[in-house]
Image: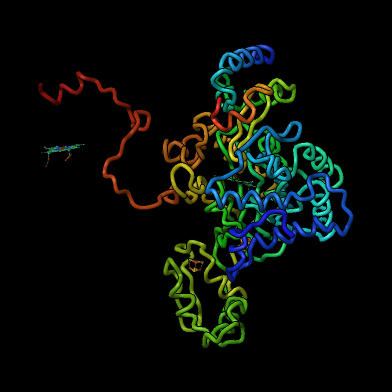
Amino acid sequence: MEYEEAKTAIVETLTKKSKSKSKFYFNDLAKIMGMKPRLAKKIVNQLVQDGVLEYWSSGSTSMYGLPGVGKQAAAEHED
Amino acid sequence: MAKHATPLLDQLESGPWPSFVSDMKQQAEVRAKNAENIEFQIPQDVVEDLLGILELSFADGTTHWKHGGIVGVFGYGGGVIGRYCDQPDNFPGVAHFHTMRVAQPGAKFYKTDYLRQLCDLWDFRGSGITNMHGSTGDIILLGTTTPQLEEIFYELTHNMNQDLGGSGSNLRTPADCIGMARCEYACYDTNALCYHLTQEYQDELHRPAFPYKFKFKFDGCPNGCVASIARADMSFIGTWKDNIKIDQEAVQAYIGGEFAPNANDHNGRDWGPFDIQKEVIDLCPTDCMWMEGNQLKIEDKECTRCMHCINVMPRALKIGDDRGLSILVGAKAPILDGAQMGSLLVPFVKAEDPYDEIKEVIEAIWDWWMEEGKNRERLGELMKRQGFQKLLKVTGIEPTAHHVQEPRTNPYIFWNEDEVEGGWDRDIDEYRKHHQR
Ligand code: HEM
Ligand code: HEM
Ligand code: SF4
Ligand code: SF4
């Protein structure tokens, strides 16, 4: 999957799910793109660099989300 | 007068051991006085509020910290651990109290001026509270606010030749023993390998794409000063293939009392004259040492490189000359499924720049774990779930006797078709020639 195609697929899927879920594991993203993790990582890195995705971290686990979606609520399972 | 009364915390100071409460009170006072006229960039009373909120947690038996958050420096997915409290009105000093993990120098070698620079930076832009070092090995800077993060990062990277460490689902900051820099037991250069792999895997360190954390640790010999065998998903432990070198004259000097055993480490008390039989030979875990007249003998084939005899008589016994390292995998501390030590995967590999053989193993493991690992599943758990055999397959390593942890307890062996000559197909006509229906 090319960058633009991947970006569209990810933004669409994450937006659709944003009511119930705001943070996603790296593997969720790789699955959306249908790519092997090591290749998917190049695109995910770029999406973060471009501000399409942002990191979330508990300190021990990392997740990804659309910027501004969920915020702290996601950590508290309030959404 | 302290900002918050802390009767429950005060009680922690009454024991015989040093207390973090005393340390924190001292730091609170230093900030309140501010003798050095520091222009504090985060609340001056941060430490007081930290004590206050901890007291509150003791009183009501619940934490007032939220876990995690969207903090970090641009382009990095790790190194900053976001901590926010849920009582910002009562304890504004710790409304944000983020931790920064800073990569420790190889083997934790510091110069005092560097430590001073680090502490000055942290007094200026953070709480001044540090943890030297965290369980990962990093320099831990405890407590700052979101706007300070980029400032601190800039200072570290531009003026201190320093980088953030790993946190989250990243390669964690690799950690090494002091190795060849100071230690004659080192079977490979831990500092060199640790540094090399840290540089090589920058992307894995700073941009999280693993199912969970992943740790490398480097011990120069089986003494394991960084305890890699218990604490790292991949442990690199120095070893040798040939024989322990014996200086028989020095052995006699230990027996005769000229040399103190254990490098004189036990001199606090009179343990009586050194007894080589009792203190070395009888304690060899593989029973492979004996005296023949006044000659010490070792059956090296049986020796597991436990280091005991060498530690007791370092001037008489030396590690062998054919040196390299063993790779063990899968150690972890409990979260899902209990603590687990590493399992031997590569019995021996030379540790020579550019370390290609070692990197092949690492990358094969990552490919497998990234694809098959469940979210928050450590390598050691994946190994248990899919089996050591699977690990051997993905790394292309032939099974050897070294991989056997204990004799087989299950009498059945299951073969895959490709492992059996001729497979499962048979010629039924040929079969019927010899077997009636
Ligand atoms: C019940 C509450 C908590 C739990 C279960 C918890 C759990 C953990 C775990 C599992 C780690 C290891 C992370 C890793 O390296 O992958 C960790 C590290 C850490 N946590 Fe917590 N934590 C708790 C509360 C806190 C609080 C309240 C703070 C600070 C306000 C905090 C600060 C830290 C820091 C600084 C580290 C890194 C320590 C190091 O690397 O040595 N934690 N915590
Ligand atoms: C490679 C050849 C064979 C294999 C893999 C095999 C496998 C087995 C297995 C798995 C059991 C069940 C054991 C249990 O769960 O208790 C069993 C039981 C048994 N097998 Fe075989 N078998 C083989 C050849 C034979 C032959 C050639 C005979 C007799 C001529 C035989 C007679 C029996 C009997 C009588 C039992 C029941 C034993 C008991 O319950 O005490 N087996 N065998
Ligand atoms: S692990 Fe071995 S080589 Fe490294 S410092 Fe300890 S004793 Fe020395
Ligand atoms: S290193 Fe350990 S196993 Fe090897 S000979 Fe010495 S005591 Fe025995």
Q: In which quadrant of the rendered view does residue B16 lie?
A: bottom right
> Does residue B196 appear in the picture of this structure?
no
Q: Residue at x 51, y 40 (%)?
A: B379
Please tell me whether residue B435 is drawn above or below residue B287 in the rendered image: above
Which part of the image, by quadrant, shows the N terminus of chain B? bottom right
User: Which percent across, then down, holds residue B323?
Assistant: 61, 57
Q: Nearer the viewer, residue A57 or B95?
A: B95
Number of marks in the rendered image = 0
Which x, y percent locates residue B330?
50, 45
* Residue placed most toward the observer, B206 or A21: A21
Residue B97 in the image: above or below residue B315: above
Q: Residue furthest right?
A: B37
Q: Is residue B16 left or right of residue B155?
A: left
Q: In the picture shown, does residue A33 fall above or below B415?
A: above
Q: Is residue B264 above or below residue B411?
A: below
Percent across and percent down for residue B309 are 53, 71
B165 relative position to B325: left or right: right
Ligand 2 quadrant assignment: top left
The reply to whether residue B21 is in sight is yes
- Which of the 4 image quarters holds residue B71? top right
In the image, what residue occupies the spot 83% across and 58% down? B33
Closest to the observer: B434 or A27?
A27
The colour mode here is: rainbow
x%, y% of residue B78?
A: 68, 37
The residue at 44%/63% (across/down) is: B302
- State left or right for residue B41 relative to residue B11: right
Tell me the quarter of the image containing the C terminus of chain B. Answer: top left
Outermost residue to the left: B437
